[in-house]
Amino acid sequence: MSAMFRDLFTFHRAPPHVATLTTGHAVPASAIHAACFARAWDALELERMIASAAHFADGVFAGGIFPEGGAPLLGFALSRIVVDEAEILTVAMTPDARGQGAGRLLLMHHLDRLAQFGARTVFLEVDEGNAAARALYRRAGFVDIGRRPGYYPRLDGSRATAITMRAQLD
Ligand SMILES: CC(C)(COP(=O)(O)OP(=O)(O)OC[C@H]1O[C@@H](n2cnc3c(N)ncnc32)[C@H](O)[C@@H]1OP(=O)(O)O)[C@@H](O)C(=O)NCCC(=O)NCCS
């Protein structure tokens, strides 16, 4: 195999990687969030959360070699920690990158980082009808602990039930 073909092969097979999200990622992160949720966070709102000491944000980025400006953001997870309890506020993947394992990679790194920063219990809320997210969380060790009817607004004006989930990190 020539060097050129080997490089191309490596480029296309390069796995995504996870890194801490910075305020410089607020714009692409807000676009991803808007593609995922009816009530989207704008870039300023996200920038404030990323900058806040109580919040922890990780991004999953495309693998490969990219020009200055960096690898494209594929998704991100954002949580806040109060003492030893964390709440995952969002996990969001751009639609094109879903179903390829990057969401799991992101969530597992994010949970490790929450543990490093002192979280022992992690809570989250997820739409009851969101089979992909509920399966992802269950496989990461979360269990259902509650149900909140009418919690989420839908684009059509109706409201969806939220399931509260919890995971122990130790
Ligand atoms: C939920 C979400 C983050 C999953 O990310 P992803 O990159 O597609 O997930 P992965 O490819 O890493 O899959 C991880 C696991 O999630 C589950 N999963 C993913 N897509 C699924 C689907 N369409 N149906 C059922 N389970 C699914 C599976 O358990 C899967 O593991 P498996 O393939 O070993 O069975 C992504 O679909 C997303 O951003 N959805 C919109 C936003 C959202 O709903 N966020 C969570 C709200 S709290």
Image (spheres, grey):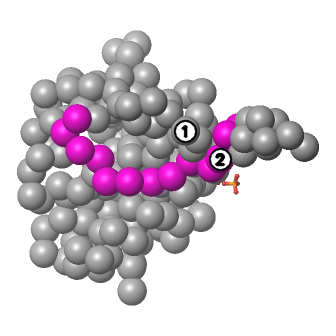
Whether pointer 1 and pointer 2 mark residues with C-beta atoms closer than 8 Å, the reply is: yes
How far apart in space, not on screen, are marks 1 and 2 (Cα)? 9 Å
In this rendering, the label closer to the viewer, 1 or 2:
1
Outermost front residue: 3
What SS does tag 2 mark? loop
Residue type at mark 2? Ala
Q: Is residue 64 above or below residue 147?
A: above
Report x, y in % for residue 83.
Answer: 13, 75
Residue drawn at point x = 17 percent, y = 55 percent = 55
Residue 46 visible in rendering: yes
Outermost bottom residue: 170
Image quadrant occupied by the C terminus: bottom left
- In terms of image quadrants, where is residue 28? top left
In this picture, which residue range is highlighted in magenta? Answer: 11-24
Report x, y in % for residue 133.
Answer: 53, 47
Q: Give the number of marks.
A: 2
Report x, y in % for residue 154.
Answer: 38, 22
- In terms of image quadrants, where is residue 41? top left
Outermost top residue: 156
User: Circle 1 is placed at which residue position?
Assistant: 65
Residue type at mark 1? Ile
Image quadrant occupied by the N terminus: top right
Please tell me in which quarter of the rendered image ligand 1 is found. top right
- Of residue 1 and residue 50, the one placed in the foreground of this image is 1
User: Circle 2 is placed at which residue position?
Assistant: 14
Q: Which mark is residue 127?
A: none
What SS does tag 1 mark? loop
Q: Is mark 2 within 8 Å of ligand 1?
A: no
